[in-house]
Image: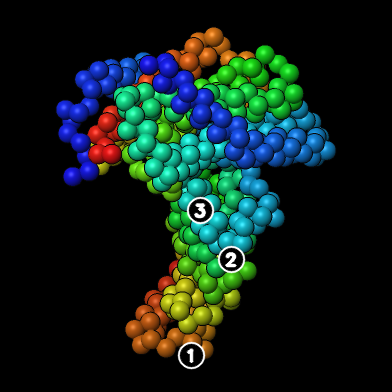
């Protein structure tokens, strides 16, 4: 055994250790507890500065920055709701992170699913527009986030023209086979909600005729939708007749 | 007892003075003056504030590292050269040897703090500079005691140095950890509550290094008398605790 017995330690030393420990605990307890202060999200540094700080690991830095940004609302000892963040700065941070790691999905996922879900239409629109602009740079990788943005525009903002704009972009630019067919088929349904029945009918008819839709169930769904649309158009025509 | 402690302390101080640490400090000073000159050219406004803030933070970190490295390496060398065994074979208590080493190392640390305060005082000729230096000396004495404790316990350079630096970083950031833990304490999850209690318990046995040697004393104005008193009391209490812990460990080692 390498250790000597406790009895070899002088008693005065054990006493001194105990007294010092008690004094330290009393001293630390007597200090007022540190308090938290919420801070605003500042503007992001330039991408050059970030690349310098990354010391050759921009992807690692991008991931770290994303975690920092995501946790910013949950500051030490306090909480800032997402809607209270400075969205101009937030967008700047997200853009910088994407510049560091263009293949990363996290910034756009956060933009469409976290920051665009706040109860502030102006901030929601800002995030959706950011997702739209970034989607256009890499449609085949970033389509899920614009698809979600389309749903937010349609169901939360009730802004059907905006939803249609995104749906058109999805239909025109998304070419990857990874994207499910409904991603490219959103426009006619939005047109239908806008009561643009004729345009919706033409689009669905065009989709069926183009042969782009391969799945039999999708095809059946579109044909049923087309049939319903034609019935609605016919019913409206009948109502308009004197 | 003083007749035993004083020669050991003097020998330790001589070792510090005759080692190449002084050259390293000279290089550090030259580097800090060089950085100060560079910052003077770069900064558009608040030049003096930027210079002193950056130099003070740099010197503080360098001082801590030099102190910890010197204490750890000196003690490990003493163990490897069997000087420790020779010392313990002498007809004096183990406590005297360790206390002598502590006094020698602490004196070297205080001298180092005094040297490092020179460029800070030159850049920030305010009342805060001497108090900053005093606080740095206190901080280095705590680091000395911690290094002594770690090297007595762990006996090897890398683990001891890593433990000291880990302790230092933890003590500097414990206030921030406490704040985060307080927020987590509101959670209903037992893991969050347990983490809060653990952090609060750790905070009780760590010195508040984040309240020491603050750059704000140089930039915004000197600290209050209460702040300096708190630094002195903390240093006294924590140094006694660490030295007692190191003595306890040395007494239990079967050397």
The residues tagged by marks 3 and 2 sit, at their Cα atoms, a distance apart of 15 Å
The answer for which chain carries disc 2 is A
Q: Which residue is mark 2?
A: A102
Tell me residue B111's x, y (percent): 60, 25
Circle 3 residues within 10 Å: few <14, some 14–19, many ≥20: few
Viewed as shown, does residue A16 lie left or right of A139? Answer: left
Element on which disc 3 rests:
helix
Q: Position of residue A23 (x, y in %)?
A: 32, 17
Q: Which residue is mark 1?
A: A211
Where does residue B209 sit, x and y in percent of width and height?
47, 27
First of labels 3, 2 by sequence position = 3
* Element marked by disc 2: loop
**Relative height, residue A48 to residue B225 (above, below):** below
Task: Give the image quarter of residue B23.
Answer: top right
Q: Choose the circle earlier in sequence order: 2 or 1.
A: 2
Residue visible at 22% across and 39% down in the picture: A3
Between B172 and A124, the residue placed more toward the observer is B172
Instruction: Please name whichever residue, A50 or A137, is drawn nearer the observer in this view of the structure.
Output: A50
State the image quarter where residue B121 is shown: top right
SS class, disc 1 = loop
Q: Residue at x 43, y 48 (%)?
A: B158
Q: Give above or below for A109 relative to B33.
A: below
Going from N to C along the chain, the mark reached first, 1 or 3, is 3
Could one spot residue B76 in this view of the protein? no
- The residue mark sitting in front, 3 or 2, is 3
Identify residue for label 3. A64
Residue A3 sits above or below residue B240 on the image: below
Q: Is residue A82 left or right of residue A31?
A: right
Chain for numbered disc 1: A
The numbered mark at residue B102 is none
């Amino acid at each position: 055994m390498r250790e000597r017995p406790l009895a070899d330690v002088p008693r005065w030393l054990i006493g001194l250790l105990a007294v010092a420990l008690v004094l330290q605990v009393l001293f630390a307890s007597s200090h007022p507890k540190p308090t938290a202060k919420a801070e605003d999200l500042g503007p992001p540094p330039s991408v050059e500065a970030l690349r310098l700080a990354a010391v050759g690991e921009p992807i690692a830095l991008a991931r770290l920055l994303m975690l920092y940004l995501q946790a910013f609302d949950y500051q030490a000892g306090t909480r800032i709701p997402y809607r209270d963040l400075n969205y101009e700065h937030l967008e700047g941070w997200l853009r910088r992170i994407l510049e560091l790691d263009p293949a990363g999905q996290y910034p756009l996922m956060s933009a469409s699913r976290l920051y665009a879900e706040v109860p502030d239409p102006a901030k929601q629109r800002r995030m959706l527009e950011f997702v739209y602009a970034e989607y256009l740079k890499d449609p085949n990788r970033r389509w899920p986030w614009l698809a979600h943005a389309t749903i937010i525009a349609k169901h939360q903002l009730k802004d059907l023209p905006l939803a249609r704009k995104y749906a058109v972009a999805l239909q025109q630019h998304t070419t990857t086979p990874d994207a499910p067919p409904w991603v490219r088929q959103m426009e006619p349904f939005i047109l239908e909600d806008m009561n643009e029945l004729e345009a919706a009918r033409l689009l669905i008819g065009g989709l069926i005729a183009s042969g782009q839709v391969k799945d039999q169930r999708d095809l059946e769904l579109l044909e049923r939708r087309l049939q319903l649309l034609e019935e609605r158009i016919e019913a409206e025509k009948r109502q308009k007749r004197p | 007892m003083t007749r035993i402690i004083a020669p050991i302390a003097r020998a330790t101080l001589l070792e510090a003075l005759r080692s190449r640490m002084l050259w390293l400090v000279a290089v550090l000073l030259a580097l800090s003056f060089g950085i100060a000159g560079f910052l003077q050219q770069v900064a558009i406004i608040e030049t003096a504030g930027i210079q002193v803030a950056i130099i003070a933070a740099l010197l503080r970190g360098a001082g801590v590292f030099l102190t910890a490295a010197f204490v750890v390496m000196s003690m490990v060398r003493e163990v490897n050269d069997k000087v420790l065994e020779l010392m313990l074979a002498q007809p004096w208590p183990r406590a005297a040897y360790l206390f002598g080493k502590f006094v020698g190392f602490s004196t070297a640390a205080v001298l180092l703090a005094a040297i490092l305060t020179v460029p800070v005082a030159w850049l920030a000729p305010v009342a805060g500079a001497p108090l900053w230096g005093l606080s740095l000396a206190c901080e280095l004495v705590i680091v000395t005691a911690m290094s002594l404790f770690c090297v007595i316990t762990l006996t090897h350079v890398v683990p001891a140095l890593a433990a000291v630096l880990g302790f230092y970083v933890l003590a500097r950031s414990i206030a921030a950890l406490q704040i985060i833990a307080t927020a987590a304490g509101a959670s209903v999850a037992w893991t969050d509550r347990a983490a809060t209690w653990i952090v609060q318990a750790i905070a009780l046995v760590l010195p508040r290094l984040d309240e020491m040697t603050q750059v704000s004393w140089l930039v915004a104005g000197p600290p209050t008398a209460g702040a300096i008193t708190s630094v002195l009391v903390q240093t006294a209490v924590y140094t006694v605790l660490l030295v007692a812990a190191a003595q306890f460990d040395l007494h239990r080692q079967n050397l």
